[in-house]
Image (cartoon, coloured by chain):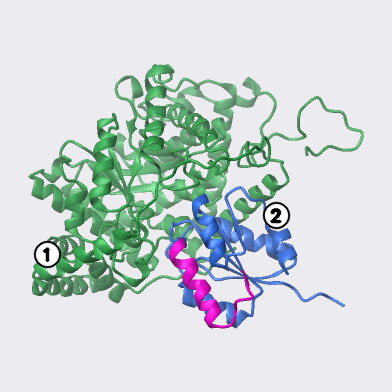
Amino acid sequence: MPRREAGEKSSERAFEFTTVSGYPIRGLYSSADLTGWDPDRDLGSPGAPPYTRGIHPAMYRSRLWTMRQFAGFGSAQDTNKRFRYLLSQGQAGLSAAFDLPTLMGYDSDHSLAEGEVGKCGVAISSLADMEALFDQIPLGNVSTSMTINSPAAILWAMYLAVAEKQGVDWKYLAGTLQNDILKEYIAQKEYIYPPKPSMRLVIDTIEFGARHTPKFNPISISGYHIREAGSTAIQELAFTLRDGIEYVEWGIRRGLAVDDFAPALSFFFNAHNDFFEEITKYRAARRIWYKTMTERFGSKLARSSALRFHAQTAGCSLTAQQPYNNVVRTALQALAAVMGGAQSLHTNSLDEAWALPTEFAATLALRTQQILAHETGVANTVDPLGGSYFVETLTNEMEEAAWKYIRKIDEMGGMIPAIEQGYPQREIADASYRYQVSVDRKEKIIVGVNKFTGEESPIEILRIDESVRAQQSMHLKKLRSERSNDEVARQLTSLRKAAQGTENLMPHIYAAVKAYATLGEICDSLREVFGTHEEVSVT
Amino acid sequence: MPEKRIRVLIAKPGLDGHDRGAKIIARALRDAGMEVIYTGLRQTPEMIASAAVQEDVDVIGLSILSGAHNTLVPQLLDLLKQKGMSDVTVLLGGTIPEADIAGLKKAGVAEIFLPGTSTQDIVDFVRGRK
């Protein structure tokens, strides 16, 4: 119920209007809110500093955002089929989801993989699986994003090996590795090793990419998961960009020139329900990153300070109840991402709260983007909301609030000390609890859940067969009997030795992968050297 | 005479790292006056059963969003039976298909809370059970 003082009259529906994150929104915005605002300095033109309006002069007029739907389940063969189906339906680029054992660096036949194989994504235990995953998919023509973090270097090495087998020069390989370990400690929790060796692995991939794969983004600095864990939009913005700052600092400390690696850094934001909060978040992100790269790091190349991002509509906003409502939510969230200038977009499926997407639900999600692109007219002009009193004021306010967090983390000594002190984790836990309380009190309405509820009828969902683990186990047995186990042992010994030193591990990982060492074997070798990480939970 | 506080173990079985819901429930139950122990991530059924015995809990709340529930939950229930903890109330939340609910309840899960459940409903259920 809206809070109101006894006897107080009000003509508004509520005492207070806030964004989904709890940020207060006034009834009207006008030029008075923009005193001191200088459009030349603060807005600029699209494709020019400070990039508030977008990073290209013509944006979607010259090229639509990449429709890149996240997919993966079961075996490599199962996912390969879904990949080829989505490409046939007009998807522009691939995005691979891996199962939990793969994400955590375990082979499908590991004891901890029981019940988990192929359930949250595709099971990849070796180069053989990666070859099957990209069967009939020309890596020279199709870009691939891989959502993998702790074992990112290894999965990337497998991808590079497949490209080599296909005869594709690495110079032409396009794609993205998520590979953002900082947000694992903060939110997604798929860490294996402690922070310092994990950062070493990330910088190894960035360094390797700068030299060998100029069109590949070795990292996707992510806020999506931070938001899914329950952060506010401002926290998502600030923690993501501060993570970016951390990676740039480590890259420079490695001895890389900022303009040699910064252009390949990419970002990944959530596209949540509050339309204007999201749009202004993206615009503020571009402006903050431009200022950071040029002022803090002295970058000279335009590409070093022009923030490129992928967006995904908010999984956490989708409901189990009345799942067809989710089609509407996703469409509106996608619209915000497009109005905010995303380079690439994934739209969630209606069955998000129940299971991985059925083919029907995945197709409808893709059609949502296609309708947006071809029927609504929003791609006809750049930054259509630019100049709006509300949008420009909120962009300024989002930026100002984010800087406060960034400065605070700077004062703590950087993102790693902040994580060790549990700071971002606690901010997120508090924000997520506050949100739940407001939903329980019906201060925030979720249609179909705490208001406008009705009779539920179950929908058809995707079921993953439990036999995937058994199949994978058989394949692994065969693999281990057919490869040269001596060569594998040699490569793993060499890798362990290199891991104890400071050389770039990518060439070693690549050699191990080509010898058909498994993901688990390589990760275990690194576990021996780096140790493993256990978090102190913040509830 | 003060009532003995209800003791609840909130656990994350398997590899699943999605802990938003588990942490919120832990806090809500704590705010409602219960003693709550949160196991943290990546607990095997053995680890959870041992913790339940060690902490002498009345209720175990499991959170699984990974699809591994049909493997991990029966394993845990079996271990609880072996350890003489069959009278502990076991609750489950997360990503649980409608079609799996009956089987899990038959195996011994007292109630399954789907996404969208209010924390008050969970507090009331736990209080009502004990």
Answer whether residue A237 is visible to the viewer in this image: yes
* Chain that bears disc 1: A
Q: Residue at x 56, y 40 (%)?
A: A457
| The hue in which chain A appears in the rendered picture of the protein | green
What x and y, as percent, mark residue A267? 38, 43
- Nearer the observer, A211 or A120: A120
What x and y, as percent, mark residue A483? 10, 67
Whole-angstrom CA distance, mark 2 to mark 1, is 54 Å
Is B47 on the left or on the right of A479, as rendered? right
- Nearer the observer, A537 or A87: A87
Task: Classify mark 1: helix, strand or loop.
Answer: loop
Amino acid type of disc 1?
A: Ala
Q: Residue at x 51, y 47 (%)?
A: A227
| The hue in which chain B appears in the rendered picture of the protein | blue
Q: Which residue is mark 1?
A: A515
What x and y, as percent, mark residue A532? 37, 72
Based on the picture, tell me whether residue B81 belongs to the magenta stretch.
Answer: yes
Q: What residue span does the magenta drawing correspond to?
A: B70-89
Q: Quadrant of residue B92?
A: bottom right
Q: Is residue B18 above or below residue A275?
A: below
Amino acid type of disc 2?
A: Asp
Q: Which residue is mark 2?
A: B121
Based on the picture, tell me whether residue B80 belongs to the magenta stretch.
Answer: yes
Q: Residue at x 40, y 42 (%)?
A: A357
